Image (tube, rainbow, N blue to C red):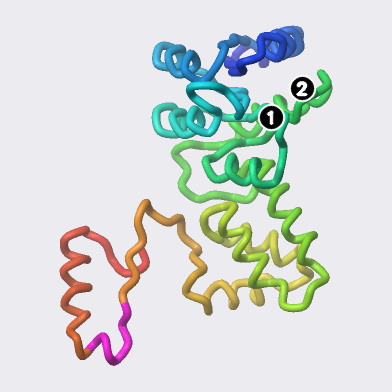
Amino acid sequence: MADDVKILVVDDEPIIIRSCETVLKSEGFNVEGVLGGKEAILRMEQTSYDLVFTDLKMPEVDGITLIRWIKQKRPDTGIVIITGYPSQDTIKDALEVGIIDYVPKPFTPAVLLDVTQRAVEWIRRKAPVEKKEKEGEFPPSMLQEIDRVITQYKNKPGSSIPVLQRCQQIVGYLPPEIQKHIAKGLNLTPAQVHSVVSFYSFFTMKPRGDHNIRICLGTACYVKRVEESLNKIKEELKIDVGD
């Protein structure tokens, strides 16, 4: 039911807020609007929302800053950006901080409703307690960006490594489902893609933490007793190699 979905629209242009409210309320959504990121944070400190539409270019608190705040304070809230600057760099920055999709300005009611429905479906499908991610649980905008990268490199020799590098930048890591998606797009087998990911140390199949620790385990490092340092790090941080 649309009326059980609470949406906050954040923009510094009142006409955008009114347009979103008119279109979405006509479909039964519960919609509120605020002028800017600062007001959005104040509102969200008091009220929870299922979905936030936010502009990126706003005074005081911009969209990226707001998205980072939401991800930290309201991680279950879905985010869609509304932008008049849908460049690849802009979308890449937004994907890195975790959006579901985006609406380019100016937009039609049909486009707004389509993106909203897909975002709501993704939110409902996503199980917060489930740790195993399936391809269907990745935001549509993320998969679209991956497909764009695949199309860009598809017919170039030796394309697998640059495609995997770009996709790891987009997703943050290369889980099995993303590897299968890439393999299908490049007309490779999943085993071929997996062998590349496994061979090169700069690829990872697990989400990275806030910090990465790389330690040389070669002969020269062994002579310098690096194993002792590694064991101390593992003991102090309560982690193992690969975590």
Q: Amino acid at mark 2?
A: Leu
Which residue was labeled with disc 2?
113
Q: Tell which tag, 1 or 2, sits nearer the viewer.
A: 1
Q: Is residue 207 on the magenta stretch?
A: no
Which residue is labeled 1 in the image?
A: 83
Range shown magenta: 216-222
Q: Is residue 111 visible?
A: yes
Vertical position of residue 85 compared to residue 232: above or below:
above
* 221 part of magenta stretch: yes
Mark 1: secondary structure: strand
Q: What percent of the width, then of the height, locates residue 36?
A: 55, 17
Which is nearer the eye, 107 or 90?
A: 90
Q: Is residue 3 left or right of residue 43?
A: right
* Residue farthest along the front direction in this orientation: 59
Gap in angstroms between the C-alphas marked 1 and 2: 16 Å
Q: Position of residue 151 (x, y in %)?
A: 79, 59
Residue at point 72% right, 77% down?
158
Quadrant containing the N terminus is top right
| Residue visible at 49% across and 27% down in the picture | 66
Report if residue 28 is visible in the image: no
User: Marks 1 and 2: CB-CB under 8 Å?
Assistant: no
Three-letter amino acid code at the position of disc 1:
Thr
Q: Return the x and y of residue 16 as percentages of the image width and height.
A: 70, 14
| Sequence-first tag of 1 and 2 | 1
User: Is residue 198 shown above or below 94?
Assistant: below
